[in-house]
Amino acid sequence: MNFREAWRVAVQWGGVALLLFTPLSGLVLDGYRVVFFWQRPLWLAGGVFLGALLTMMLLQASRTPRMQRFFTRMSSGSVVERQSALPVWQGLLLFAVAAGLPWWMGHYWLNVMILALIYALLGLGINIVVGLAGLLDLGYVAFYAVGAYGYALGSQYLGLGFWSAIPFCALLAATFGALLGFPVLRMRGDYLAIVTLGFGEIIRLVLNNATEITGGPNGLSVPAPTILGLELTRVAKQGGTPWHEFFKVAYDPSVRSILIYLVLLVFLAMLYFFVGRLQRMPIGRAWEALREDEIACRALGINHVTVKLSAFAMGAAVGGMGGVFFAASQGFVNPTSFTFFESALILAMVVLGGLGSNGGVVVAALTINILHEVLREFSDYRGLVFGLIMVIMMIWRPRGLLRIRRPFFPVGKAL
């Protein structure tokens, strides 16, 4: 290993970082004078120096035969398995543990877990479009917004409740997904990404400017979920009975969050199972065929129009359901929650977890959201830390945390 070369490159990167971070983070305007904080640029430059040194040593170590075998194994495509990646009893045990979390977590962390599960739901949705069908979608947040606003507007104009809003918004978002899919049938790669990015921005701008309908930047309030006619609020607002008056107990605001968490957890488990089964069915295998080679897929007689539209519609429907849960948990929606950053974050979860890997997407969504809250005290550097993690992941595990697992079919056995 050439340590001299690694030190030389690390010193160069550290020097460049010091020059860049000194005026950006070291000089602070205090009234009419400039105060110099020398610690910040030094810490940042030191971090860049260590990162560059470790990267260079890792790259040099990867040239050895042993490490080359390791990285080859890590970056190999998919894994063919004879049995399920997660046995049924382990899945049920994991679900039971997750269902018991609200009773020992605080209200704050319960809301964090709700948001993490919503992102896991969205990750599974966009994984259908990007991971399985190979259609790069940078405007996925538009379907998320359609679901959230569908619930808010549906409750205001149509009298929809939480339970009826879930299928309604899923169908509404699926319709938008199919409408987006028609004009982009001939597009792929960068061109498709640009069109979907534009679609996401169109939806956000419409929500922001149609003030008479959507409330514009002021947003809309969303009614709280109800269960069997019982309202989960302190005072009845939808003509029902507050739950604490019905059971004659003290009001506890965390009951609403617990209900949303449990319902969301059930939906996530069902969707995880459903998408896993779809991957073994002809439609799932057609998605993967389309992702690998569209021309070969069409030569085999697969209708690429149906395959693409089904991927867009199904992914959008999941995004719409995620929007309903988000609106119900927040009690309020406005366009600032549906920016391009959300699309990029959801897409990053899929890349980090592994394209096409449902388990990896769920793990990545939970990790990123929990890490986001743990690093809240270092909010100014969260983007930097997140970027470094993505770079390290691309070097260490370019296929994601959990590689896609393909089912094993014995010869001579019908599917």
Image (cartoon, rainbow, N blue to C red):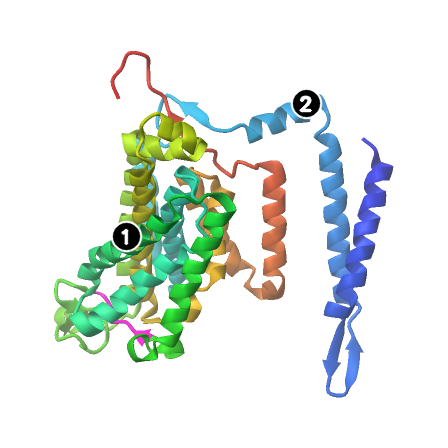
Q: Residue furthest top?
A: 412
Classify 10 Å Cα crowding around label 1: few (below 14), some (14-19), many (20 and above): many
Q: Residue at x 62, y 65 (%)?
A: 380
Which residue corresponds to mark 2?
66
Q: Which residues are magenta?
A: 220-225
User: Is residue 262 among what the camera can see?
Assistant: no
Q: Earlier in the sequence, mark 1 or mark 2?
A: 2
Q: Secondary structure at mark 2?
A: helix
Badge 2, how many Cα within 10 Å: few under 14, some, many 20+? few
- At 75% across and 33% down in the image, what residue appears? 60
Does 272 sit left or right of 137 as displayed? left
Provide the residue designation for mark 1. Answer: 174
Q: Quadrant of residue 404?
A: top left
Q: Quadrant of the C terminus?
A: top left
Image coordinates of residue 371 in percent, x first then y, are: 52, 54
Which residue is pictured at 46% across the width and 43% down the height?
Answer: 188
